[in-house]
Amino acid sequence: MGIKLVIVESPAKARKIGGFLGDEYVVEASVGHIRDLPQRAADIPKEYKKIAWAKEGVNIEEDFEPLYVINPDKRAKVSELKALMKDADELILATDEDREGEAIAWHLIEVLRPKIPIRRMVFHEITKDAIQKAANETRDLDYRLVDAQETRRVLDRLYGYRLSPVLWKKVMPRISAGRVQSVATRLIVERERERMAFISSKWWDLTAQCEAGFNARLLSLDGKRVAATNDFDANGGLKEKSVANILLLDEAGANELVQSLSGKPLIVKSTEESPRTERPKAPFTTSTMQQDAGSRLGWGAQLTMRVAQRLYENGYITYMRTDSVTLSQSAIESARASAKSLYGAEYIPAAPRVYEGKSKNAQEAHEAIRPAGETFRTPGELAPELSRDEFGLYDLIWKRTIASQMSDAKKMQMRVDFDVETKTGAAAIFRANGSVVTFPGFLAAYEEIVEDKASDDEAAESDKRLPPMSVGDSIKVSNYICEGHETKPPARYTEPTLVKKLEELGIGRPSTFASIMSTIQDRGYVSKRGRALVPTFLAFSVTGLLEQHFGKLVDYEFTASMEEDLDRIANGEEDRVAWLTKFFFGTEGNPGLE
């Protein structure tokens, strides 16, 4: 009886899976893609070298047929896999469960040409139960996913090969344009243009430091509200609707008010308490994991995905390229059981929480990113097994997953307004805001993490408890202070905020976010200043040229519509050749690439 040859992408994955399968299985790694479109002229097979379209790697006249070549560094690997296949009576392709994984499986079939039964094995976590279940529930290859991946590869090749030569002539040699990289670069350039056009405004405000241990901010003076951050528009000026009703204090006026209020107590005008409920966030998708790792750990997208890959391949988390926020029934039960055990029965809601994602594409079948296994191990339990980086990311994933199935947090928000009359007879109103957590709910899972940070002046004191006060009470003020402020230009993108923006626009997919971040930096369009992404002069030049001559191809909605069309191909709702024909040769409203 022969062996069952199982092929996965990485050696680490092969070792882990091999330990879960019986002696009749041999698990080997392809080490990623084994073939691709030609990267250079030397890669083109001899019989194609004199054919005009071969350098581009796509035969447009023959239904956009790609020319695939075995990667030079994979020839030995192909020979090794063919040798192993001679002793096999079944080939099982266990590459990742997304379009790239499906395409790798198809390329293996095309190159190895097996004469034995072929099965596709998919799983979203590398645990013993999941792997053995997947081995017993194999399926056929999904050619719709293969078509979608091939369409994307052909599309990106045609885009880059048609536009890049224009940039060589107009800007400088050997630079590149890309379907998504050029759009991501445009976002960064546009943000920098906004910053350059920004005109800063200055204003001052007053704070009363009360002896009771809280601060109150000047809200209005003689019926006119004092300017705050939210009264200014994106360009740094007062919003048009605010001009007539806002008092814009300057330094002299603020200091004069301080002198006029000195020694004056605040009189409680009104008090208000209102309950607030805060719901937990959905489990991680690739995008939200990258954003959270960026804000919590200071990581870029590439580092986040490298660490997540290790956690996945070693059986600690589920597959890390997903746009789904759903959890399996067993995962929901595990999260609820963990929360109940760790925090108490009152920390889980009566019914499980169900989250609905915005995505409608084929990858929605995946689960969200969560701890692997039927029982979620705590970060503390895994600490001896994980590196520092692995522990940091697993900790975020575990907390997010557990919290997603916990009860709402409950808070009581307090607002107190105070009257005070200046020495010149002007009526001033000050306001103090406070908030206290009455039931932590899901926040208990985050321990030291503060989920809600103040976003404006009025919320700046909202994390403090206010003492009991009644209307008419006199509150002693230890000091009145004034402070100057200046409107700030829109913040430059960081990797996490750029990923968030791309996702909001519908551009890119879980498998591409990290590579977009690295590509725009590696090719000289963007540099990092701290964590901020700063466009280079090259980025301004190329973006300007593309906007002027190829505006549709760097249009955000058009690029997003291409992503949606690729999803439709993956779902079998769109034909690959028909779509590429429309894109390349053009239609009404689309100039095409021809």
Image (cartoon, grey):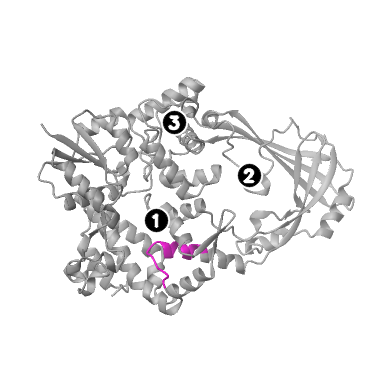
Quadrant where the N terminus is found in the figure: top left
Q: Secondary structure at mark 2?
A: loop
**How far apart, in angstroms, are the residues tagged by discs 3 and 2?**
25 Å
> Which residue matches tag 1?
506
- Mark 3 and mark 1: span between their CA atoms? 27 Å
Q: Which residue is mark 2?
A: 454
Circle 3 packing at 10 Å, graded few (<14), some (14-19), many (20+), is many
**Amino acid type indicated by mark 3:** Gln
Residue 405: which disc?
A: 3
**What residue sits 36% from the left and 33% below the top?**
315
Q: Earlier in the sequence, mark 2 or mark 1?
A: 2
Indicate the quadrant where residue 370 lies. Answer: top left
Residue at (78%, 34%) from the top-left corner? 213
- Please determine whether, in this image, residue 274 is positioned above or below residue 43: above
Going 49% across and 29% down the picture, which residue do you hit? 383
The stretch of residues the image draws in magenta is 174-188
What label sits on residue 573 in the rendered view? none
Between 29 and 275, the one lying in front of the other is 29
